[in-house]
Image (cartoon, grey):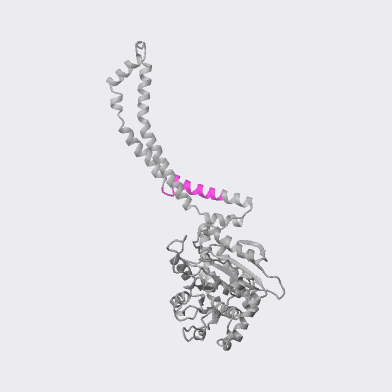
Amino acid sequence: MATMTSLIGLINKIQRACTVLGDHGGEGLSLWEALPSVAVVGGQSSGKSSVLESVVGRDFLPRGSGIVTRRPLVLQLHKTEDGTQEYAEFLHIPRRRFTDFAAVRKEISDETDRITGKTKQISNIPIHLSIYSPNVVNLTLIDLPGLTKVAVEGQQESIVQDIENMVRSYVEKPNCIILAISPANQDIATSDAIKIAREVDPSGERTFGVVTKLDLMDKGTNAVDVLEGRQYRLQHPWVGIVNRSQADINRNVDMIAARRKEREYFETSPEYGHLAHKMGSEYLAKLLSQHLEQVIRQKIPSIIALINKTIDELNAELDRIGRPIAVDSGAQLYTILEMCRAFDKVFREHLDGGRPGGDRIYGVFDHQLPAALKKLPFDRHLSLKNVQRVVTEADGYQPHLIAPEQGYRRLIEGSIGYFKGPAEASVDAVHFVLKELVRKSISETEVSNVLVDATLF
């Protein structure tokens, strides 16, 4: 048992790591989806929250009308020594212990609002809550938003489908154990939880059925046919639960006392007395814990294989993009200098020969520039008629005595002006080639080898 307890704790740690790293399941290779889990599924007002609180033995979940659970709640239960104080911890508030479970309820609501706002929208980003108590068994449960049929005021019309899609994303996983909650005062054939469980797990191998509100059934009726599997058969036994009444909740009746009252109900019930040893929240918690241990034992090889495969892929990615460099400033400076030297070597080879690129720069000056210069209108600019006109205009009212210096200057300046266009075009062409060579040199520089050398340094 100690070994399996540590295995459940290990799975809990891996789940928390997945959440921190943003792995909530979905497309691609997901470690989260490979981990065995127990997803709690039920319609609104099916008694889902009361079941969870009965399993924990504490009143800690937000209550209200409409959709109260708007983010998945990953509830990890850790059994402690008898006599130790109960406390709770949230993954998003590390190293803070909650001993007041009313504060736990408020923090769940506040953390939900941080992601979804004050609206009634939902989010698939889970909240991780760990509870340490001598009154629980080692178990992990995922509380999902309650299935609904109609969007209420303040909700998008797509909320019904959005919730169903979120629930399906959990229960479709082959490693997910489905805890299907159905109220006894509702026909099991119309149960939202059983409907979706039947679609994703038609054989019933992964589904545990829970019937709540047995004490609220009409007089003369009972749920014996359901609990004994005659109405809808599953591979695992059905479990009946008697929730606290609203009056008990209003009076803050202790959950331990509520468990005792539940046991007494089944033991003294003429309809369910013969099933009393397999009914109640305490039996449900033990049943789920034992089954989760079995599933983990079966899935350990595949989980290890997936982790090893992921490690190999990450190592290959690191080899491609380069290993991490040391935090020491000297090693970092050495790495930078080595990268610059490697780049300089490749860039010189492109310019001086050995790698393509330098010949294109030569082509600009040997072909493009001369061809552009030959097209310049020097014949017209330096014609005898134009020279005479420029010289005359430059002299003005004082003719030159020896040489027309001002005229020559204007002719030279005009000629140089013609050179500007071809020269700028040549500069742009060389600049374009150099930028391409820089990009090529960066991609061809063996950065990974440089980083390996730096690590050795």
Residue 433: image location, x then y, percent: 41, 44
Establish if 174 lies above or below 267: above
Q: Nearer the viewer, residue 265 or 384?
A: 265
Write down the quadrant of residue 73 in the picture.
Answer: bottom right
Write down the quadrant of residue 216 in the picture.
Answer: bottom right
Q: Residue at x 47, y 49 (%)?
A: 441
Question: Magenta span has 345?
Answer: yes
Q: Is residue 91 visible?
A: no
Residue 261: image location, x then y, percent: 63, 80
Numbered range of the magenta stretch? 337-356
Q: Nearer the viewer, residue 119 or 180?
A: 119
Q: Count how many numbered circles sit on residues in the image.
A: 0
Question: Magenta span has 65?
Answer: no
Q: Residue at x 53, y 60 (%)?
A: 318
Residue farthest left in this picture:
385
Q: Nearer the viewer, residue 279 or 257?
A: 257
Establish if 294 lies above or below 383: below
Residue 135: image location, x then y, percent: 66, 75
- Quarter of the figure that contains the C terminus: bottom right
